Amino acid sequence: MRSDANDPLTGVNPRQGAHAPVAGVGAAIIEAAMDAIITVDGSRRIVAFNSAAERVFGWSREEALGAPLSLFIPERFRDAHERHISEFGHTGVSSSSRRMAAARVVAGLRRNGEEFPLEASISRVAEGGEQYFTVILRDVTERVRSDEALKRSREELREFAVATNTVREHEKSRIARELHDELGQSLTALKIDLAWIRERLKSDREASVKLAAMQGLLDSTVAATRRISSDLRPLMLDDLGLVAACEWLVQSFRTRTGIACAFDTAGDLDLADPHATVIFRVLQESLTNVARHAKASRVEIQVARADGRITLSVTDNGVGFDPDGDAQPKSYGLVGMRERAYLLGGTASIQSSPGKGTAVRLELWEPEAAR
């Protein structure tokens, strides 16, 4: 498998060595390179093979010279690689270079049959009427392993965060139900008893005044308990589902702020946790931001499910803001939206500009079980 052709980059005959000082310098540089360097002729036979290539592929220079380049490529990739080189060879340029598979790694084949990832760049020169292709190869096995380990670690962290968030929501649901069922019922019983006492002591003016104040305090306590319970987690999200909970949230927003609010749904929105909770919480945070900052007169909301995706959009006609401006010290709600979306592999985007309102869009993939 030996070859008598000179390496077009160095002028070195692999059997005779360098024929000029400059060629010798070029050969020394290539030989000292940490990346594997292989040169092939027009028939894809190897005419140059440096020491790094020997280490990477496990073949000696004597064995590699004259061998086909396909020897170092997994069989399933050989046709595609040949087409790539052929297309590169017909560019019509006498000397050119190109990064191969710049957006991804390609596969090489070691002597022992092991496949491994590598990055490659290719250059072409024409000499003596023949084309030569030189490929510079970098073994990126360790980098790919590190990337895969980092990806697994991130996925594990995301799964842990989803589980933690689910546990937190369940705990909120438990506390909200206890506030509603136990404390709420106890306060209601106290109101009934207080009304009974007021009726029997209405002739006592001083006692009536005191009992009226107690009645007012008790009423405000009942209202605060209901509000805290709903803020923790509205029970209707568990009992009646996502659409009913969103309708309640929108109606509560209208009543509290006086802002006109249109709510529309599309598709089957019978969703379970954690998707239902994420959509509800992002809508809740979006409406809170509108009430606090937007100075809007109208809000349009749509929740839709189609083509394997679930989307939530909240658009207002308020004052807007510059998303690329100075970081807002109290923009944790926006960060929370993106974090909730990320935990489910989705996205949350915010579009706004001064004087042109704000649009929040949440996009999630539907649950695996429903696909």
Image (cartoon, helix red, strand yellow):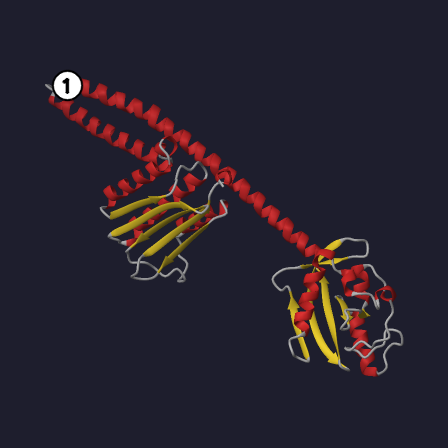
In the image, taking residue 327 as reference, residue 1 lies left or right, namely right
User: Is 84 situated above or below 256?
Assistant: below
In the image, taking residue 62 as reference, residue 34 lies left or right, namely left
Residue where numbered disc 1 is placed: 199
Which of these two is toward me, 128 or 100? 128
Q: Secondary structure at mark 1?
A: helix
Is the N terminus in the top left, top right, bottom left or bottom right quadrant?
bottom right
Q: Residue at x 32, y 62 (%)?
A: 354
Which of these two is toward me, 56 or 295? 56
- In the rendered image, residue 184, in percent from the top left (x then y), is placed at 31, 26
Q: Which residue lies most toward the right here?
A: 16
User: Is 343 situated above or below 182?
Assistant: below
| Amino acid type, mark 1 | Glu
Which of these two is toward me, 72 or 245? 72
In the image, taking residue 241 as reference, residue 291 lies left or right, namely left
Number of numbered callouts drawn: 1
- In the rendered image, residue 351, in percent from the top left (x then y), is placed at 38, 58
Task: Tell me the crowding category of disc 1: few under 14, some 14 to 19, or many 20 or more residues within 10 angstroms, Cα based.
Answer: few
- In the rendered image, residue 36, in percent from the top left (x then y), is placed at 76, 66
Decide if residue 119 is in sight here: no
User: Is 265 situated above or below 55?
Assistant: above
In the rendered image, which quarter is residue 247 located in? Answer: top left
